[in-house]
Each structure stands twice: as C-alpha cells, then as structure tokens.
Image (cartoon, rainbow, N blue to C red):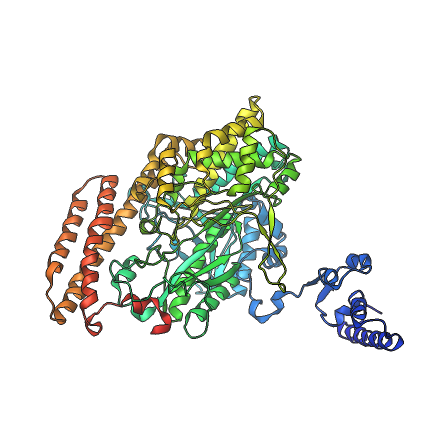
C-alpha cells in the first residue's frame, strides 16, 4: 500500500483488501474459522480502516505471532486529539503556558522554556510582557491584575484573593490617543496598601506599604477582560503578608533537605532539578436553591445555618451518594458549566459526583505541583460561586452549613517526587532510582517521625472556624493526629526496625466476585481507612481533615516544613558518620505510636491513642495557640519558612479571624430571632416562652468579648459563645420551628434548602 495517499483513500483500500481476505479464506477452506481471519485482520494495518484515528504500535505488530486477539488489542491506542472535539477545543486557551505561550513568546525571541527559569524576571521580562500583551489582546483582555492571597480570607472573601485591576493602556492627554502600555517592570511587581488586610501586627497605617512580586511557579491566566498574575505579597521589609510566600519557602526547604537525604541514599536529585511537592484537592460543596438562600440571613452572612431543625428525611438512607446527576434539577448543568469554565483556564477538573448529604456535591482535579493546585483551587471555588448564581443556585463552601448531616472537606492528597517524577513514597521507583532497597523505609521513617513530633502543627493547619463542627463527627477524622499505613506496610516497617529486610513490595490480591462471567480483578492488599486523618494511599498521603473553605497553603507549608526538618536531621546524622538505616530504625522505634490502622471513630481507640501521647487538641482555638510554642517558632525559623515575627502574626490573624467569625454569627442570630422567629411564633398565636431571653443572652456574651483584652482571651470566649451558648439558643429556636405552621415560618427550612428535586 502507498502510505503517502490520503488517509480516507488508504482506508478504503484497506477495507477492500480486508473484505477480499475474508472471502478467500471462507471459500478456499471450510476448516479455517472466521476467528482466525479476524486475528489475521487484526495483525495487519487494515485495522486502521475501522479506526482511522487509532495507531497500532509497529513493534507490537512485528512481535505478533499467533497471540490472542486480546493481546493485539492491547497494542492499539486511541490517539485522537481531544482539542478537535468542540467540547474541549477551548481547554487551556486562557492560561499562558505550554503551546499557547510558546507561540507568542517565540515572536519576541524567547520560548516557553524561558518561563521555566525564574531568572526570566531579570533577563527577559520585557519580551515576556510583550508576548503576554499580544496574547491578552488577541483574547479580548485589556486589563491586568496582580493576584495574591491575603491572610484570613476563608469563609468571607469571595475568591479568597486580592485583586486590583489596571488597564494596559497609556493615555495621551494632548492628542487624546491611546497606546498599549505593559512592560516588564509592570509585569513583575506591584504595590498596594498592606495595612488594610489582616496582618497580625506586621503593618500599620503609618507604615502601610505592601509589595507584590510575580510568582514564577504558577502560570498567568485570563478570565473575561483581565489577565491574572499570580503574586506573593510582602511588607516593606520582606515579611510575608500572604498565604503563598511561606509555602514557596517550605517548597525550597523540602527540596534542599530532601535532595540531601536522597544523595545519601544513592540518588543525586539536585542534579536533575531537585524535588517537588504534589497535591490533589477534592472540593466538596452544597448547592441550594438561590431563592431559598435569600430567605436565610445566616447562610448569606456566615455560610452556615445557626439554627434549623432536621427534615423528616436527611442522609440516613445514603440515597444521595454517587446517585445520578440528571437534568431534573439545575445541578447537572451547573456542574457541567463549572467544568467548562475551569477547562478554559487549564484546570484539569476531572471528576464530578454527588456526595453523601442531600444537596452536596464534589469536584476533583488531576493532581499537580502544590502552588499551581492551590491557585487553581481558589479559582475553582470562585467559579463555583459565580456559575451557581447563573443557574439560580447558591454554592455553600463552608465546612458545616447544616447541623445533623455531613459537612464538606477538601481532602489534601500530598506527595513528594523528584523533578523527573520519581515518587518518594512508592517503593519500587525510589529504590530503583537510588539503587538501594532501603531507601523507601528510610524516607517513610522520616515522615512518621515528622507526623509524631509535629502533630500539633498539623492540627493547627486544619483549625478553620467551620471545622469546629466537623472534625470527629463521623464525616471527618477526629482531632487526633495519627497515620494509617495498612498492615502490609506496617509489618514491613516493623521488620525493618528490628533488623535488615529486603525491598518492600506492595502486595496485590485477586478479588473474585463469585460470578462466572466476571473475571477476578487485581486490587491493593490494603483496604481504605476513612477514619484516619492521614492515611497512606500508595505514593501519597491523604490529609482528610482539611476544611472545604480553606486556602490549603498553611496545610502544605506545615507538611513540607516538618518533613524538611526530619530530612535535614537524618542527613546531619549521616554526615556525622551514622548509618542511614540506624537513624531510620531509631526514629521508627521512638515514633511508632503515631501509626494506627484501626477505627479512629471508636471512642476506646481514641482514649488509647490519647493516653499513648499522640497529639490531640480538640479546640480549634488551642490549636492555633501552638504557633507561638518555642519548638514551632524555632522550626519555621530554622527551615527558613517564617521568621518568629511572621509565625506569631499568623497566630494573631487566626485568632482574630475566629473571633470575628463568631461575632458575625451571633449578631446574625440576634437579627433572625428578632425579625423572623419571634414574629413567626406570635403569628401562630403561640407563647414565646424561653424565646424572650435569648437575644439578651447572646448580646451579653458579645459584650463580654468586646470588653476583654487580648486576641487569645477573646477567642476563648468566642468559642464558648459559639459551642455552648449559641447551641443552647439554637435548641429553643429549633423547637419553635417544629410547631409553627409552615405558611407562617418566614425562614427557609432545611427541607426547602437541601432537596433540589422537591421545590
């Protein structure tokens, strides 16, 4: 066949030849079965006639010699470019990376490889800015924005980012003409007011400068008429005022000290680009009818319902989990558009499904480098809220919008890998790279030691206001920081610390479902443990306790920093002459208690873990307090992640954010009692009873908080108000809702909010 012919003509010729082969075979010998002819067809390029966009591996064809049709099919792959399909044609067009960026950059004498070296901000900023300007204007954008992440934005700030928009134009006052104006200096830096954001004392009105520098690790993207430049935010002295800067420093720390340890184990990671931290973030949300949302002041102002009785049906039948997303509600179209909008800016939002609670849903992307994933997750949350409104829905991102049913999390799937994608937490690849069967258990020993020693910081990192109601409520792990490794890996590490062992090989098993027509499938030897806050999942750890509304920068700053510290400690001891295996064995022996493979929801197990000395801090306020502990101040400072001043500022910001959240909730509750609950009870001609003293009870607690000095003391009082006083007040209000006729109750009920298909 002449393979230079047009593919359609070639396909017709192949089909013609294929048909003749079948005819010849069927007429010349009765004994040859059709299946043999089919195998022959599969073994020649005629298969292209049936799938012209597929390609058969030529080497596989050469090797074929009487193999089964199944093995031939395994060598066939479908390689049609998804960008040729209308649904995906816009994927990534609005993010300045890859082929999109390269096409513009080459016009100005640079390439996409230029962006891989952070020094482009010093050497090629004007060329990159010119390319970005052309890309922006070609896509209808004429505005730029340095896009940064202020502290304490969770739960209130839409998009959780700071944004100031500037036109990429120069205005000639004399001629009234316009010229485009966007150069390298404009691209790489900006300035704003640093004192008007939460800063924990790092800024004041008389020293208010806040400075922005482009984050070269995360790509610039475009939405509507604006290009967004991911940036860090610091004060005049370089102190971090944002969530991102400490994370970037923690990335540097784990790269430096992880590379040191790997070199001791036999692999020179620094020579191939060092290490990187990858994460994948599962985002849970609620979607509720927007008209009912507007009948709930608490949802509008605080993101959660401060009162409301459960409906006759909730989640007890598990009927919502993974149920079909159908067109009989607006949820499907909403989720489809959310994915489409994310695809445009290159966010690989791969999965969507219903979650456990009624009205609850989840998105999950493909994993990636932590800074990019966090930036993208903030965009995802913003898009979710904006698209939901277009479909007459309201998206609730808060961790516990409704009492009595599951809340929402953002599972943080965390892993470390070399720049060449060799995973550190997967035995086979890392042992092979190091040519050392002991590399994997030594790395795991460092991680186990880090978790045990710094579980207090892990608990701090998830101490968001919404997690007050979620942790340990049979929907998220309890506030006891342990790790599940599974019996297979645990037994291996037990043998390792007791003596020398061979390489770890994760076991697999055949799962037979007992049906003759269904073949057994290969599954991991270990089950899943959803009760563990930090289970190992093969190549990654899943930090399950993270809250849905959180910016997870602090979570990953902590994970990278505590592991960097242990990698450094191991390396220092090896430098001093100790054997790596001995250091690891000692660490496992000392910190073994943090490994727990049982049911973390079981109260007896919780008591056992607490008595063993595993970190347990039930109070979110007390969790935030650990930042100022000497061991933690020293840790962040030594690893170059945060100065003492920066660390203490985080504690102040977190405490003030907690107190402020509770004040908004209490004031909203007061308004709801005065403006809705009491009038509804009176309209029903029912006695007010205990309702009469509720407002005064809440106001009195708020007055005490306002009169108290000190961010820590205020936060402790706010916690009592929230978890004791407001809970008692809620019970009275929920009882009133039970007896007031529906037509007289002015607030949207749980039934009206949670069941999209009922209203």
Q: Residue at x 80, y 64 (%)?
A: 43
Which corner quadrant of the image does residue 645 belong to?
Answer: top left
Is the residue 187 above or below the residue 354 in the image? above
Instruction: State the residue in front, 171 or 552.
Output: 552
Q: Position of residue 340 (x, y in %)?
A: 50, 66
Is residue 633 toward the left or the right of residue 90 in the image?
left
Instruction: State the residue in front, 167 or 401.
Output: 401
Q: Is residue 323 visible?
A: yes
Task: Name the image quarter holding the N terminus.
Answer: bottom right
Q: Residue at x 19, y 45 (%)?
A: 705
Is the residue 50 above or below the residue 611 in the image? below
Q: Residue furthest top?
A: 577
Instruction: State the residue in front, 94 or 139.
Output: 94
Q: Position of residue 84 (x, y in %)?
A: 62, 68
**How many numbered marks, from 0 up?**
0
Q: Is residue 240 visible?
A: no
Q: Position of residue 698 (x, y in %)?
A: 16, 53
Is the residue 262 above or below the residue 743 in the image? above
């Amino acid at each position: 066949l002449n393979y230079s012919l047009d593919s359609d003509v070639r396909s017709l010729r192949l089909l013609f030849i294929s048909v003749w082969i079948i005819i010849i075979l069927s007429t010349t010998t009765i004994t040859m079965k059709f299946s043999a002819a089919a195998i022959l067809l599969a073994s020649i390029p005629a298969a292209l006639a049936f799938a012209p966009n597929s390609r058969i591996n030529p080497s596989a064809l050469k090797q074929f010699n009487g193999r089964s049709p199944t093995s031939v099919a395994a060598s066939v792959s479908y390689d049609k470019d998804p960008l040729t399909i209308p649904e995906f044609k816009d994927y990534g067009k609005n993010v300045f990376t890859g082929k999109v960026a390269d096409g513009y950059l080459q016009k100005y004498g640079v390439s996409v490889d230029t962006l891989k070296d952070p020094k482009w901000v010093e050497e090629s900023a004007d060329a990159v800015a010119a390319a970005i300007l052309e890309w922006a204007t070609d896509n209808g954008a004429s505005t730029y924005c340095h896009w940064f992440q202020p502290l304490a934005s969770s739960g209130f700030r839409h998009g959780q980012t700071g944004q100031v928009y500037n036109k990429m134009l120069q205005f000639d006052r004399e001629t009234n003409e316009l010229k485009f104006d966007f150069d390298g200096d404009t691209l790489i830096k900006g300035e704003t007011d640093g004192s008007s954001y939460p800063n924990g004392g790092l800024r004041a009105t008389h020293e208010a400068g806040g400075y922005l520098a482009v984050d070269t690790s995360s790509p610039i993207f475009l939405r509507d008429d604006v290009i967004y430049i991911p940036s860090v935010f610091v004060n005049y002295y370089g102190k971090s005022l944002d969530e991102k800067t400490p994370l970037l420093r923690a990335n540097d720390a784990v790269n430096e000290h992880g590379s040191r340890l790997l070199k001791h184990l036999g692999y020179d990671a620094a020579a191939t680009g060092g290490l990187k931290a990858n994460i994948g973030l599962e985002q849970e949300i609620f979607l509720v009818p927007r008209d009912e949302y507007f009948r709930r002041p608490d949802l509008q102002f605080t993101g959660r319902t401060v009162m409301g009785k459960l409906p006759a049906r909730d989640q007890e039948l598990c009927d919502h989990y993974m149920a079909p997303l159908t067109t009989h509600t607006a949820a499907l179209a909403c989720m489809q558009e959310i994915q489409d909008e994310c695809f445009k800016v290159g966010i690989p939002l791969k999965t969507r499904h219903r979650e456990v609670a009624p009205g609850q849903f989840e998105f999950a992307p493909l994993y990636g480098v932590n800074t990019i994933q966090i930036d993208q997750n903030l965009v995802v949350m913003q898009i979710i809220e904006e698209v939901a409104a277009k479909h007459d829905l309201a998206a609730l991102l808060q961790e516990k919008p409704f009492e009595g049913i599951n809340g929402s999390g953002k599972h943080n799937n965390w892993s470390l890998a070399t720049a060449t994608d060799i995973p550190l937490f997967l035995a086979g690849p890392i042992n092979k790279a190091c040519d050392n069967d002991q590399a994997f258990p030594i790395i795991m020993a460092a991680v186990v030691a880090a978790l045990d020693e710094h579980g207090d910081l892990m608990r701090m990192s998830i101490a968001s206001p919404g997690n007050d109601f979620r942790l340990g409520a049979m929907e998220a792990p309890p506030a006891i920081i342990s790790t599940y490794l599974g019996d297979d890996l645990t037994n291996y590490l037990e043998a390792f610390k007791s003596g020398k062992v061979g390489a770890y090989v994760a076991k697999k098993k055949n799962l037979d479902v007992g049906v003759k027509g269904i073949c057994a499938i290969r599954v991991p030897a270990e089950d899943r443990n959803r009760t563990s806050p930090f289970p190992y999942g093969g190549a990654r750890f899943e930090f399950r306790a993270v809250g849905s509304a959180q910016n997870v920068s602090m979570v990953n700053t902590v994970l990278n920093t505590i592991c960097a510290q242990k990698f450094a400690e191991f390396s220092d001891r090896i430098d001093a002459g100790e054997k790596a295996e001995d250091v690891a064995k000692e660490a496992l022996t000392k910190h073994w208690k943090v490994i727990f493979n049982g049911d973390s929801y079981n109260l007896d197990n919780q008591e056992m873990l607490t008595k063993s000395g595993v970190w347990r801090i039930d109070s979110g306020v007390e969790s935030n307090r650990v930042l100022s502990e000497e061991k933690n101040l020293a840790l962040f400072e030594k690893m170059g992640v945060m100065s003492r001043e920066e660390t203490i500022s985080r504690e102040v910001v977190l405490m003030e954010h907690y107190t402020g959240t509770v004040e908004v909730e209490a004031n909203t509750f007061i308004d709801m009692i005065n403006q809705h609950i009491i009038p509804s009870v009176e309209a029903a001609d029912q006695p007010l009873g205990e309702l009469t003293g509720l407002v005064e009870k809440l106001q009195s607690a708020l007055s005490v908080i306002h009169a108290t000095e000190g961010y820590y003391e205020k936060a402790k009082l706010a916690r009592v108000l929230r978890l004791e006083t407001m809970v008692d007040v809620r019970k009275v209000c929920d009882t009133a809702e039970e007896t007031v006729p529906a037509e007289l109750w002015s607030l949207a009920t749980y039934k009206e909010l949670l069941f999209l298909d009922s209203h």
